[in-house]
Image (cartoon, coloured by chain):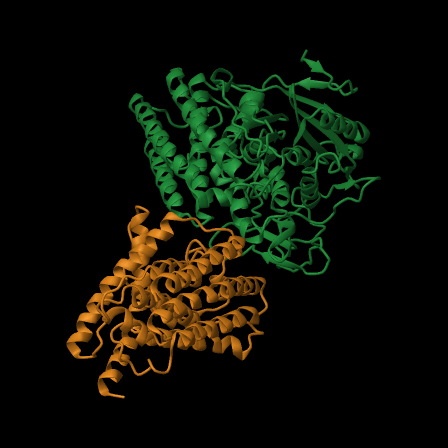
Chain colours: A green, B orange
Amino acid sequence: MSETAQFFDLPITFTRQPEHVFPAWEAEADEAALEEFCIAAHRAGRRLVALWGCDKRDRQPDVPARGFALHVALDLAEGLACLTLPMDACAPRFPDLAPIFPSAGRLQRAVRDMIGAEPVSSEYPTDLRPWLRHANWPADYFPLRHDTPDASFPAQNETYGFVRVDGDGVHEVAVGPIHAGVIEPGHFRFSAMGERVLRLEERLGWKHKGIERRFVGMALAEGARLAGRVSGDTTVAYAWAYSQAAEAIAGVTPPARAIWLRALLLERERIANHLGDLGGMANDVAFSFGLMQFSRLKEDWLRLNARLFGHRYLMDRIVPGGIAIDLSASGAAELIEQCDTIQREVRALKAIYDEHAGLQDRFLTTGHLAPERARQLGTIGLVGRASDQHWDLRVDHPCAPYDELETRVATHANGDVAARALVRFAELNESLHLIRKILSGMPSGDIRCDVRSAPERRGFGWIEGWRGDVLVMVETGLDGKIRRCHCHDPSWHNWIALEHAAIDNIVPDFPVINKSFNLSYAGPDL
Amino acid sequence: MNLHALFAQLLELLLALLLAPVLVGWINQCRAWLQNRSAPPLLQPWYTLNKLFRKEVRLADNASSLFRAAPYIVFSCMALAAAVVPTLSTELIFSPAADAIALVGLFSLARVFIALAGMDVGTAFGTMGSRREMLIGFLAEPALLMVFFTASLISRSTSLATIVQTLAHSEFVIYPSLAFAGIAFVMVLLAENARVPVDNPSTHLELTMIHEAMILEYSGRHLALFEWASSLKLFAYSCLGIALFFPFGIPESSGFLALFTAGGTMLLKLIGGGFGLALIETLSAKMRVFRAPEYLGTAFLFAVLAMLVHLLLETGA
């Protein structure tokens, strides 16, 4: 008999999912109970991890009340709690959770676009504007329903209801999705008074690739490659999270050496991205010396990745059941040596950053996200930590090998661009430290085990990527192939924080604020 | 008017047109070296101009004739400005016609047209750029004028040729006032030519642009003319700096040999000046737009100080 528990003294009985390497709990709830549980979790200072919908009409065609399901994953002190709300087959609806968790708003709009289930609220107006659907397909075409055929539609224009700011002297500046440089597509609508930003509204979803639909019917092992391509700069975290989910479904535990090597790759990915961002932030205030130096360090870092692991960004190195490539003793020595070099050079560059008056003048107080605001918005990951939100899975729910590594979480209370730079510097140093620990404690043995898919199972993977926690949920069908795979990017939660961080800044400071967040455009748009 | 003056004038104009993009190429090379990376070719700006001149011009549907005329007007202004500054000889046919104040006027004329063109199509960026450019411009111009006034007070003339003659060819005197004026001038030069720390000529972030934002809608030969014009402006400013603060070596006569040596010394000075500019740009980050008034206010203050120093120390009873 598996372990059960109730949380917050509410009558929802959760069942522990023992195949997972972190504590994972599942339960079913009705609308009222779901809402009540979310309120209790919010009151206890916990947060929303992800929210997604599933089409279940083919499973129990004779029970229309269970035609669809909404899954809500929460981060509790006891682990990951996933609540399932059955929804009606004809008119799927669920309670609007945005008043409780602000970041739920866009997730709900995405659920509506993809599966056709509507958020409803009796108290508050519900935002029903499309989010991922850009008039590239009709409003009654739901890509993630099983009976939706593949189809192509002519591109159309649809007006999107941006919130208007009225007043004397207020004007709008619209930027993107096509920019003056070759950068990521995002549309930003500023309502500004002179140069001062009164309001910023984002419109994302220009990178829709249909990944979630593509997952359907894939073999379990094959899905890892696709999951690793959800967001290229976070490929290690996604591949690891997917592998955790696949291993939970198969009921296997990969060899210890593989797990330690995965952590090594994850920390290397974190460092590569932090090096790139620290350079990019300097470049956005026209201090190109910083960009050049950090780009050089990042390039060295990536080249060693390519030489030792066979891929610059470590794509497809983590596979369900273990890891694709082993590390030799001489390779480990090279990694240690590179850590020393990078640490020395980063220390010198940090001194330059710290003492550069012009740079600090641009960084300090810019893009301020107060800790209180970050808490209300549910800001997570690196951006959250720079605003005093201490979320880090490596410490909160450490899976192997992090349970032995004692990660020190870097936080800062200032919440401005400078704080985000400092947190990056601190995390970089901590990751270098972790890499040394991992290499000295690395067990020997196999690096891979067999993963056999099982029918009708659900598995979760939850990994602290460099932006924040990545959640992957995989469900298998009767044939053991993927029925539904949902990949959740941490950027979902932090994009709304960016809108708030830009307020009261001047328009030309937005690029450096955006760079200091460096959120994914592709990850939340599958 | 004599033949020598005509020849010197033509030669100077030709040199300016040819060398201006090379100066930009040189600055870019120095910047690259100072950042530890390998540099683009010296003639890269010329290759870019060549490319742009061959490209088709795309115009917005609602572009007016002002939008089409602006590149030519701005280019002519800058070419004329580069021709007016005495670099090879003080004996130029334009020298009696155009003095320091006319030069500032010429720069303003170009600014007005480029700002109008920026707003013409009605995009948010063009308007934003024009607005910021006018903010910079109306603060930079008085500072530049004050610099000229200091030099004019020393030479008792606003004619550039006379100023250079006085500074270069009368007996050697140290003017402390010119040191202050020099600082003010360099600050104005950086602001007026869209360089770091006021603007970033190499940025692709449209929200931060000043000069680039105004010409964002231009393409083909129009864009080429703007690029060429901004390199001419930088060239004219550099030559002005040389003429006012390092005029040694600019000959009074316009004999062929004198022109030749003058050309050589000018080249050396430009190489040094370009490197200095690249050094300043590498060492600084761009400041917030709203720091520009403080920055240009400081430039103005330095220029006023220069004048006071001149009046107090150098006029003597």
Q: Quadrant of the N terminus of chain A?
A: top right
Please state which of residues A325 and A305 is positioned toward the viewer in this rendering: A305
B231 left or right of A162 in image = left
Q: Could you say which quadrant of the image residue A104 lies in?
A: top right
Q: Position of residue B34 (x, y in %)?
A: 31, 48
Residue shown at the point (75%, 25%) measured from the top left: A40
Q: Position of residue A187 (x, y in %)?
A: 59, 53
Answer whether residue B301 is visible to the viewer in this image.
yes
Answer whether residue A179 is visible to the viewer in this image.
no
Q: Quadrant of the C terminus of chain A?
A: top right
A432 lies above or below B160: above
Residue most extreme to the front: B317
Count of all numbered marks drawn on residues in the image: 0
Q: Position of residue A177 (x, y in %)?
A: 56, 54
B96 lies above or below B266: below
A307 left or right of A264 in image = left
Q: Position of residue A330 (x, y in %)?
A: 29, 23
Residue shown at the point (77%, 44%) measured from the top left: A126
A170 left or right of B151 in image = right
B97 lies above or below B194: below
